[in-house]
Image: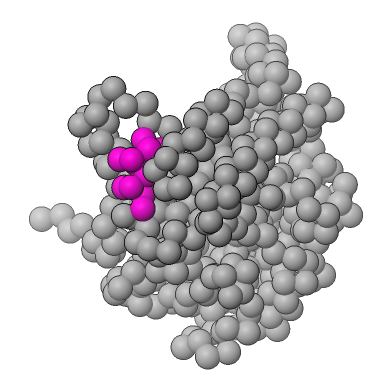
Amino acid sequence: MVKANENYRKIQASYLFTEIAHRVSAHQAANPDAKIIRLGIGDVTEPLAPAVVEAMHRAVDDEASRDKFHGYGPEQGYAFLREKAAEFDFASRGISIAADEIFISDGAKCDCGNIQELFAQDVAIAVGDPVYPVYVDTNVMAGRTGANDGGRYAGLEYLTCDASNGFVPSPDVLKDAARKPDLVYLCYPNNPTGAVATKEQLQAWVDWARREKSIILFDAAYEAFIRTPGIPHSIYECQGARECAIEFRSYSKTAGFTGVRCGYTVVPKGLVAYAADGSAVELRPMWTRRQTTKFNGASYITQRGAEAVYSPEGAAQTKATIDFYLENAKLVKEALKSLGYVVTGGDDSPYLWVDVKGDSWEFFDRLLKGANVVTTPGAGFGRAGEGYIRISAFNSRANVLEAIERFKKAIG
């Protein structure tokens, strides 16, 4: 008799987006002629930038030539992409990150889930609430939590993100924590709330982590949407962050790579965890070992496409697409505010966090059935998400404008 991993049975209900898909499918089956507009899952809708497509075509041609063919590549990523990321994402902002501290992968989601393999089974973990489910569920699967009780797992420290703190928790909330967190997951611009953190707010977390010998796992997947001057694009803009932080980056939202799959993780040299005997263990070699053992690298074609994002043409084209999504967000935000709703996000993020002052799943169903519009119920992101819905700005302009008109009729 083969025993199953009991930790999977702890995961509360279905994965959020699976449940949404089930409800949408049932609604579509009952209303086959309904034109459903999807503003739920954060998948992009606009095509890849022409510069990216051209680079990928050239890479395909390389694979058709014996002289230029690429088979297995370096698991850490090709130097041509790591060097571009180091130059344009960090050095251009005065941040010292070397190319060999960057590890190319098939996306930030995988890295956010896989990074926990570097740490001991009994590490204490803090996450925001509401939170991107991957941070929580992967640690549940790994057996680091107890059972789910009322929407929260025993053994995790939850940092409530609500209107009272602008959806950016302070490390001060950990003064009364049952256990000092060893790992803290932070995501800014935030998914799901769309909120951003100031440099002062992030510096407070860095100072705390250095003092406590903890590590920040910083998800910067949406940094390319930041337009407000002074908002950090990287945790490494904070003094001392190299000593206490790992950062995750993604080309999914930056350049529409949700279907292509590419991202990277920064693990600085000298960043350490501690062995059972108290000795320091450098994490960069551990991540190298993990990747070379379990990952064969993102494809050559994909990485050539990602490299093109940093070309003058590619940078301008991807920025134009992000600006398009931000304009979508602005239109929806203004419309909802005119209907009397309080909305966070949408200025430096593709997400709008809408206070619906009621049950979030009920409001989700109200919009689905009354407007044929798919959103995301805040309760699916954690207990503190109850009373909110998340709306994504990823869609065509025509669909966004149509959704606004439907909102006015359904919830106006």
Judge by depth and name the residue closer to the eye, 347 or 294.
347
What is the span of residues highlighted in magenta in the rendered image?
A: 363-374
Q: Is residue 352 left or right of residue 365?
A: right
Is 40 above or below relative to 273? above
Q: Main secondary structure of the magenta part?
A: helix
Residue 392 location (% of width, % of height)? 52, 43
Q: Is residue 30 left or right of residue 178?
A: left
Quarter of the rendering occupied by the N terminus = bottom left
Q: How is the image coloured?
A: one colour
Give the tally of numbered discs: 0
Q: Is residue 2 left or right of residue 167?
A: left
Location of residue 161 by image quarter:
bottom right
Residue visible at 77% across and 48% down in the picture: 227
Residue 205 location (% of width, % of height)? 68, 74
Residue visible at 78% across and 66% down in the picture: 199
Is 305 above or below relative to 153? above
Judge by depth and name the residue closer to the eye, 303 or 282.
303
Location of residue 141 by image quarter:
bottom left
Q: Is residue 119 left or right of residue 226?
A: left
| Residue 292 appears in the rendering | no
Judge by depth and name the residue closer to the eye, 119 or 387.
387
| Residue 47 appears in the rendering | yes
Q: Is residue 170 magenta?
A: no
Residue visible at 54% across and 70% down in the picture: 162
